[in-house]
Image (cartoon, helix red, strand yellow):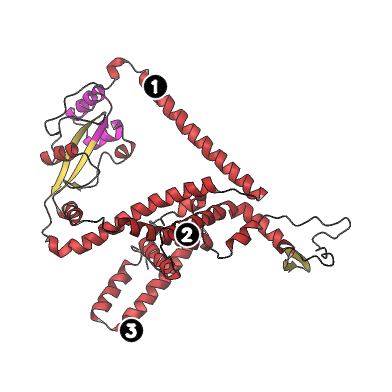
Amino acid sequence: MKRAFGVMLMGTAAVLAGCGGQPPPQKTATVQNLAVTPPPAPAGATAGATVAAPLGHAASPDERIIARANGEPITMGQLMRPLIEAHGLQILVGLAQLELARQDARADHLAVSPEDVRVERELTLEKMFKEADQKEQDQLDEAERKGPADRARKLREQIRTDREQLLTQYLQEKNFSRTEFDLKLEINACLRKEADRMLQGKVTDEMVEKEFGVEYGETARVRYIQLDNQNEVAEARRRLAAGEDFGDVAQRMSRNARGAAMKGEMIPFSRQTPGLPESFKQLAFSLQPAQMSDTLSLGGHFYILKLEQKFPPKAVKFENVKDALRRSMYDRLTQNLMQQLDGNLGRRAVESMRIEDPLLKKQFEDFQAQQAAAIRDRQKMDEQWKKERLLQPAATQPATSTAPATQP
């Protein structure tokens, strides 16, 4: 199997940053006792020796001996402290997220079973490693259609084994533990239940027909240059008239960083593609291949477009693909909604937690201070940028421009 690692698990990075976690059933008792430092040994005691508990005094969980090194005891408390220092905060925030997700599910009368978590795991591994096991998956599809059943069973087992190996490699590369991964899966299982509830009846026939236009209608591949004022427009047009390549001018002059990095090239889109202004789409489809547009004034910016290629509609009947379109559309909307719910869950977990353990509390306060400093730095950068814009000469300020005829 090809070992490909181009896919990221939704929320994996968020867990490490304090927005995810996992689900040991006895988590509350464990977390409450994590960072208790073993009591100091009395004077004269041998280093590492365990002091016998007084008569009538039961040893605390942290005094419990879990191993011996050359006869010397190692206690649970000695083990837990470095574990907390290394991973305690992200696990704790993950547990808080899971608790909130469970509370939300109960409030909405949603049951999240172990089977739901198992299904979430399969969906996650399929999304992560779909490209890696595509060959085996194609063979499995053929075996399930034509048989024999024994070959299909062996292929399913092989795919499952390969995915587990890929997961192990992936977690090692990302320094992400199985415990954190499993915790995130249970959180996502809860979020999927919430998303399913919120999307019931929301994917209408009209939406599916529009999706058909996006997937199978006429599409255009376009490059664009985004500029801030008429002086920049004039300079870009001067360069283009002098024979400079459109992509090179976009790379050097476009005010859209992502567009500049791609030399202005966009993913092909149709007239029904959501998220693009109608005037932008109309202008693009009014062009002929290799033709450049007039200047489009839109949202305080100026745009020059070039049509690279236009693709005709695909010869597909709506009735033949509408069910598959509905499923793919529902899946995409579910993923988007789960991401929104996950972000909200992370914020609520951070805001609602009251940490009593001193070590974890210090880690949490440091984390909050770092977050606040990052926000202040971004605000300072924004303020400086606005100040520099205001100090620009009037001649360089965006001028009022009549929109092209294609703008409604």
Q: Is residue 292 above or below residue 349?
A: above
Instruction: Label the magenta part by its dominant secondary structure.
Output: helix
Residue 228 falls within the magenta-colored stretch: yes
What range is drawn magenta here? 225-253
For disc 2, the neighbor class at 10 Å (few under 14, some 14 to 19, many from 20) is: many
Disc 1 target residue: 388
For disc 3, the neighbor class at 10 Å (few under 14, some 14 to 19, many from 20) is: few
x and y percent of residue 117 in the render?
43, 66
Viewer-nearest of discs 3 and 2:
2
Amino acid under disc 3: Asp
Of labels 3 and 2, earlier in sequence is: 2
**How far is disc 1 from disc 2 in space, using C-alphas?**
48 Å
Answer whether residue 311 is visible to the viewer in this image.
yes
Disc 3 target residue: 150
For disc 1, the neighbor class at 10 Å (few under 14, some 14 to 19, many from 20) is: few
Q: Is residue 61 above or below residue 274?
A: below
Residue visible at 17% across and 63% down in the picture = 321
Q: Nearer the viewer, residue 161 or 114?
A: 114
Residue visible at 70% across and 55% down in the picture = 36
**How far is disc 3 from disc 2 in space, using C-alphas?**
40 Å
Residue extending farthest to the top is 394
Q: Nearer the viewer, residue 66 or 289?
A: 66
Residue extending farthest to the right is 44
**How far is disc 3 from disc 1 in space, using C-alphas?**
70 Å
Circle 1/circle 2 CB separation < 8 Å: no
